[in-house]
Image (tube, grey):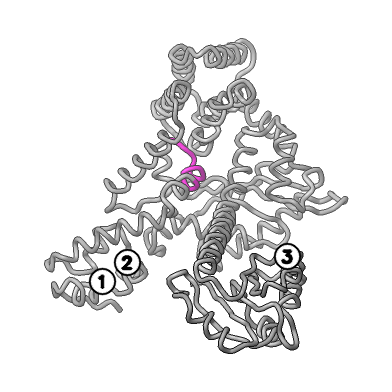
Amino acid sequence: MYKLIVADDEKIIRNGLVRIVNWEQLGFRVEREFSDGKEILEYLKQEVPDVILTDIKMNQVTGIDVAQYVFENQLPCKVVFLSGYKEFELAVKGMQYGVEDYLLKPTNVKKLKETFENIKKELDEIHHKQRMDQEEKERLDEMLPLLKEQFFSDLVFGGLAENEKEIRNRMHLLFPEEDPDSTVCVLADVVIRNYDWYINEVWKYSFDQFRINLENFFRVANRNIDFYMIYKSNQVLRLFGFWNIGGEKAGLEQKFREEMDWLMGELKQNFRLEADYELKYLMQNIFQIQKYQEQLVLSQTETGSGKEFLSEQMRLIITNIHLGNFTTAQKILQNILHELRDTYEGYRNHVVIDLFSSMSAALREENPELYEYLRVHCNYSTVLSIGQVDALQDYCDRILEGMRAEAGKKEASQDNDCLINRVQTYIQEHITEDISLEMAASQLYISSSYLSRLFKKQTGENFTQYVTRKKMEKAIELLHDSRYKTYQVGEYLGYKTPRYFARLFRQQTGMNPSEYRNKVLHTGGSFDEI
């Protein structure tokens, strides 16, 4: 209901306006009645209605004065005038203050209803836009950490290494107050020594929650360096950090080590995690990441004819992609990986990253659709985590097959719907496991940040909310069977502790599992939730 106030210095007219129509049926509720504009101005200092229906001429403060006050103070409410035939010029004067409409006395009920029906439509549109804007802001706020992590992942794994313009644009968007030319950057690995013990003996919640907690920890637990976790594989965490130290850049490594020593202490104090760190690369500015990429590849690449052969083969792959010969491109890549079968897995993985990075750069202008597909679906973190050459081959095949499908498909939205359906099917098939966003994204060979954004856009829920809701629906189904104790239901659904399961169940239903079973399902059974 929209709030309405009514003002007229004649009580009989004022009462008639309030009772002449069914305001609630029109979508309005009369909040107050006033006999003068002075009372309206006092009311507006405390409350702002959606609509003011006021007479023009009143004893002390006129409707014109009220409209002017609303206009000058930019109050979010509409003003409708009541006027006599001789007050037309005054009504016109009020229009300069944005008055919505004016109604002649004696009031025509049909005209009054039409006016407020139109006003309600306008208010509905305004409120709808406000809700959409707020939802968009919330989505952006939710996505911002993911976008930042994706930005640093693209930097580190080669997606932006040679594109200074894109780096500047994204830095300006994500970190508007930072100067990319003077921002010192660091890449470091953190190795958790007691990871297995911690996960099995200490951590009682989901893998997703552990990752989220670590990400949040690195975002907030800093003194000088802003850290972002761009990669996690069991006990190994890769961090990208940056900080603006002004003009003086002497002693950077010492400053970094002091910060990391403090951070390792905080990690132990807050999580009971024993960890060491290794400085991988220190950059004077963010654009030096290109040199890191060159060192990374050169440190593992053979010299001489082998290197030249590899480069030529990679050029052939990109040429065939341009020509649409995906089968040929796929076969060449299979041959490359076969030749590299006995090499160090880190080298193989970086060859693949270098290939997809070069392919991305080549497709950016000539084929934006394939470039976008590759940007979204090729996850460098996933490539780095693949240990077996056959699994790496399977990953590359899926990427190229996906590009082939992308080149021939007509409707992108249908592809997104299909992707979400596959995610939902995966969740349903693994409902008894500890399902994480990374696990689902890995099954589909796309980045977890892209899956997170797409899932929220397509379903209206974030991934974790959806998984929890589906698990609780399964829990309710299992609670119908009184043979299962409530803690057994929680265990079956992959929750490590009954307390955590009960807390999530209460968040979804308003009751703990035992209460729900007794009060809603009437199936009996007992379990001490405490």
Mark 3: few, some, or many residues within 10 Å (few <14, many ≥20)?
some
Q: Main secondary structure of the magenta part?
A: helix
Is 190 colored magenta in this rendering?
Answer: no
- In the rendered image, the vertical position of residue 254 relative to residue 454, given as above or below: below
Nearer to us of marks 1 and 2 is 1
Residue at left offset 63%, top offset 83% = 8
Q: Label 1, secondary structure: give it.
A: helix
Of the pair 396 and 256, the residue shown nearer to us:
396
Highlighted range, magenta: 445-453
Mark 1: which amino acid?
Answer: Pro
Task: Mark 3 or mark 2: name the one nearer the start of the chain.
Answer: 3
User: Based on the displayed image, in which of its 4 quarters is residue 410 positioned?
Assistant: top left
Q: Amino acid at mark 2?
A: Phe
**Which residue does the numbered mark 2 point to in the structure image?**
501
Horizontal arrangement in the rendering, residue 27 relative to residue 518 (left or right):
right
Disc with the residue nearer the chain's start (3 vs 1):
3
